[in-house]
Amino acid sequence: MDFHTAKTLLEWQVELGATEAIADAPIDRSALDRVKPTKPEPAPAAAPSAPPVLPSPVEAAEIAVADAKRLTSGSKTLEELHAALAAFEHCELKLGARNLVFADGQPGARVMLLGEAPGRDEDIQGLPFVGRAGQLLDRMLGAIGLARSNPDPGRAVYITNVLPWRPPQNRDPRPDEISMMLPFVERHIALAAPEILILMGNISCQAMLGRKGITRLRGAWTEAVGLPVMPMFHPAYLLRNPAMKRAAWEDLLAVQARLETDG
Ligand code: URA
């Protein structure tokens, strides 16, 4: 393993919460030098076997999507979908995540929000949008009278992400990861049954609209999975670019106006 790979792996472990570099049992390294290597027994001649045929990356992606569709079509409730997601073994992000982040808020809320993927805080708590971006999101929603904890479907929101597992070092989700998780997202939306879908940032636009370019997409109603959709700047982007909050405010007002006219 070269230096940069080892350093990246170590940094990721630190991000995952590792605080000490120790093993379960002590190792007497001075004794290791004294241990004479024993000559291995020659292995009995094995019968030649055919090399394992691994699927190509394209085939593996197709298998993953087909399995996701099989699992989601059998999910008739959000609880079943949660269990199906937990049983899905094709996404390697699962291996590095502490928690599966499914959703928060009220299923059946008129407004559903779709984010990108859990970050560090979400991975630790197992809930979407609980870090700094999530706190800003809660304030933004509160400004138009919506809250994830409100039991009234007209004043509640339901929140999930395109990916349920945190990507290492918060890297962007890859297209193959988005494709294999899309059947889960579509089923999630169908089971939560919102009236309006808000797409936060480029990744959710890429997943649901097949398009990126949030600066051009934001603020204009469009449609996906039979629902009116409002693309908005991601709250993490707004934290880095506070001048864009004004545009986000306009988009929230458009959502509020639509809730009033349709309501
Ligand atoms: N950003 C997201 O897109 N989703 C989260 O859950 C947290 C941060």
Image (spheres, grey):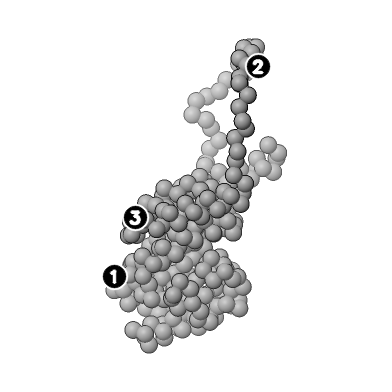
Identify the amino acid type marked 1: Pro
Q: What residue sits 55% from the left and 23% below the top?
A: 27
Q: What residue sits 47% from the left and 51% below the top?
A: 67
Question: Can the viewer see residue 24 in this picture?
Answer: yes
Q: Earlier in the sequence, mark 3 or mark 1?
A: 3
User: Can you tell which mark lies on residue 151?
Assistant: 1
Q: Earlier in the sequence, mark 3 or mark 2?
A: 2
Quarter-of-image position of residue 258: bottom left
Q: Position of residue 132 (x, y in %)?
A: 49, 63
Q: Position of residue 135 (x, y in %)?
A: 45, 66
Q: Earlier in the sequence, mark 1 or mark 2?
A: 2
Q: Nearer the viewer, residue 46 or 38?
A: 46
Do the residues under discs 3 and 1 have CB atoms within 8 angstroms?
no
Q: Which class describes the residues within 10 Å of circle 3: few (<14), some (14-19), or many (20+)?
A: some
- Nearest to the eye among marks 3 and 1: give it: 3
| Mark 2 element type | helix
Q: Position of residue 23 (x, y in %)?
A: 52, 30
Q: Position of residue 101 (x, y in %)?
A: 43, 55
Question: Can the viewer see residue 235 in this picture?
Answer: no
Identify the amino acid type marked 2: Asp
Q: Nearer the viewer, residue 80 or 257?
A: 80
Do the residues under discs 1 and 2 have CB atoms within 8 angstroms?
no
Do the residues under discs 3 and 2 have CB atoms within 8 angstroms?
no
Q: CA distance from mark 1 to mark 2?
A: 66 Å
Query: Seen in the image, is 32 located left or right of residue 101?
Result: right
In which quadrant is the C terminus drawn? Answer: bottom left
- Mark 3 highlights which residue? 80
Q: Which class describes the residues within 10 Å of circle 2: few (<14), some (14-19), or many (20+)?
A: few
- Mark 2 highlights which residue? 33
